[in-house]
Every structure is written in structure tokens, then in C-alpha cells.
């Protein structure tokens, strides 16, 4: 299957700083990318959906000013956690697919995740 | 909105034994159903999916699942597990017309020698 990478795999930062996480589709063009947050022993929670060249659509309860998403190209999306606090510590996972949300089925491919720890 | 319940948080089983991981969903509309596997420090990988057609779906690594509309279930089965099947398994559902899944909490499958 197709490969999605994330960088960094782990990051530790101080409270109040901003952290950027990159998500890349390595061998296909990702029309749509998704960002999830996963708490220990819990399911993946969809944070936002982004289409290349347009603004991300955030799920209810997700602060768009805190979690900035940029999908500037068909192979790269970034999630920036601004003014991070300890409660933002979590496992962040991105995924990518080549079709739009309501296109015929295209598989979603997931990155390996980024563990964020805010001290 | 749709939701997914994975009834077992952890399923221990001996190698070569059969296993069933349970998944129930709730939705007021037609759905698509998925099972994903997550190995340690890796991303989720699609095991199998039900979009339409035959209710018995076969996936990778010898897994299969059966869509039961009357019981709103999509249980995952494998007749004989291997040590390498030890992983976290996620059931997911999306409403018809959209393929963005909503995930269950996951079931940790632990295969003992």
C-alpha cells in the first residue's frame, strides 16, 4: 500500500511554545488529509479534514486557532499546535487519501503518529 | 451520528486458537464498515472493509468479518492466530456517501505461545 510519513515521531516541548508536525504522502497525491488525536486506550478522534489548497474543516470542539492546519501541496500537510499546554500532550496521527470526501472509495493511509509531550 | 462499540478492550488467546473481536455500531443511515490493525509504533493498516455486496468480507492476513445488519454488528474473526497477530484492532464506521471513519476504542489482541 501507499506510504504516509510523519515527522517528528516524538517531540517534547515546554509549555507555551509551538510545535509543528509534518505529514507527507510519499508515493501518491493526497487530495484529502486528516488529522486525528489518540488518547491512551481510546479511539482516534478526528480533529480536522483538509483539502489541498483550501481551509481545513474542523470537528466540533476542536479549536482552529490552537491547531493550525496547512495543506499547501498534494503531498504535505502540517499541524501546528500553538501555545502548547500539558493537556495537549497526546498521540497525533495523520492520514491521507487520493480522493475527495464523497468520491468513490479510495483507501485512507495512515502515518505512524507523533507523540507530543508538553512539559 | 454514527458510533462504534468494541465490547472487549483486551482479548488474550493462545497461538493457533480461533479468535473473534466484537464490534457493534449504531447509525440511522446506511453505513460502510472497516477493521484496521495497529502494530506498535506503526500507523493503522486496513484489514478489510464492507461497502456493499456480500456480507462476508475477507481481508488480509487471514482475517474475515461478517456484516449483520439486523444485529448491527461487524465482528472480526480468524480461525487460527499467530504470535505476529498481536496488535491493536480498531473497528470503524462511516455513513453512506462519506468514507471518513468514526473509530471504536480498539481491542488489544494478545497472542500467547
Image (cartoon, rainbow, N blue to C red):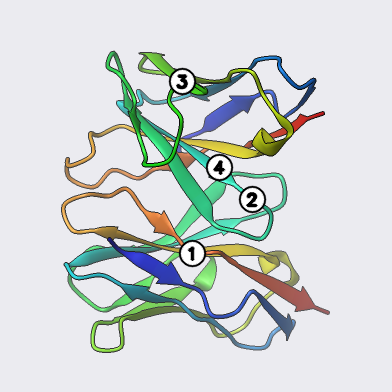
What is the x, y in percent for residue A83?
Answer: 64, 18
Of tags 3 and 1, which is closer to the observer? 3
Marks 4 and 1 close (CB-CB < 8 Å): no
On the image, the x and y values in percent for residue B95 come to 23, 58
Q: Which mark is residue A37?
A: 4
From where the camera sits, is residue B84 visible? Answer: yes
Helix, strand or loop at mark 4: strand
Which SS class for mark 1? loop
Q: Of marks 3 and 2, which one's residue comes earlier in the chain?
A: 2
Same subunit: marks 3 and 4: yes
Q: Element under label 2?
A: loop
Q: Chain of mark 2?
A: A
Residue bearing mark 3: A65
The C terminus of chain B, quarter of image: bottom right
Q: CA distance from mark 2 to mark 4?
A: 7 Å
- Distance of mark 3 from mark 2, alpha carbons? 21 Å
Q: Where on the picture, by quarter, is residue B112?
A: bottom right
Residue A117 horizontal/vertical position (percent): 76, 32
Asked if the residue at tag 4 contacts the one at tag 2, i.e. Cβ–Cβ closer than 8 Å, the answer is yes
The front one of A93 and B28 is B28
Q: On the image, numbered disc 2 is attached to which residue?
A: A39
Give the quadrant of the N terminus of chain B. Answer: bottom left
* CA separation in Å, label 3 and label 1: 27 Å
For disc 3, the chain is: A
Q: Residue at x 16, y 52 (%)?
A: B97
Q: Residue at x 42, y 16 (%)?
A: A70
Amino acid at each position: 500500500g501507499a506510504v504516509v510519513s510523519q515527522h517528528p515521531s516524538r517531540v517534547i516541548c515546554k509549555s507555551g511554545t509551538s510545535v509543528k508536525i509534518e505529514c507527507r504522502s510519499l508515493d501518491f497525491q493526497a487530495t484529502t488529509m486528516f488529522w486525528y488525536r489518540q488518547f491512551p486506550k481510546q479511539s482516534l478522534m478526528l480533529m480536522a479534514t483538509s483539502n489541498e489548497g483550501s481551509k481545513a474543516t474542523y470537528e466540533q470542539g476542536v479549536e482552529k486557532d490552537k491547531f493550525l492546519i496547512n495543506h499547501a501541496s498534494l503531498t504535505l500537510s502540517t499541524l501546528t499546535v500553538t501555545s502548547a499546554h500539558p493537556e495537549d500532550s497526546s498521540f497525533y496521527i495523520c492520514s491521507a487519501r487520493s480522493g475527495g470526501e464523497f468520491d468513490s472509495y479510495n483507501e485512507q493511509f495512515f502515518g505512524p503518529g507523533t507523540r507530543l509531550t508538553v512539559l | 451520528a454514527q458510533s462504534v462499540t468494541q465490547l472487549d478492550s483486551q482479548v488474550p488467546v493462545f497461538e493457533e486458537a480461533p479468535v473473534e473481536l466484537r464490534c457493534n455500531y449504531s447509525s440511522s443511515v446506511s453505513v460502510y464498515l472497516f477493521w484496521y490493525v495497529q502494530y506498535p509504533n506503526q500507523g493503522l493498516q486496513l484489514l478489510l472493509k464492507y461497502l456493499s455486496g456480500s456480507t462476508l468480507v475477507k481481508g488480509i492476513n487471514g482475517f474475515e468479518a461478517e456484516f449483520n445488519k439486523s444485529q448491527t454488528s461487524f465482528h472480526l474473526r480468524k480461525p487460527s492466530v499467530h504470535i505476529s497477530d498481536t496488535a491493536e484492532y480498531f473497528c470503524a464506521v462511516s455513513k453512506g456517501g462519506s468514507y471518513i471513519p468514526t473509530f471504536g476504542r480498539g481491542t488489544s489482541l494478545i497472542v500467547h505461545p
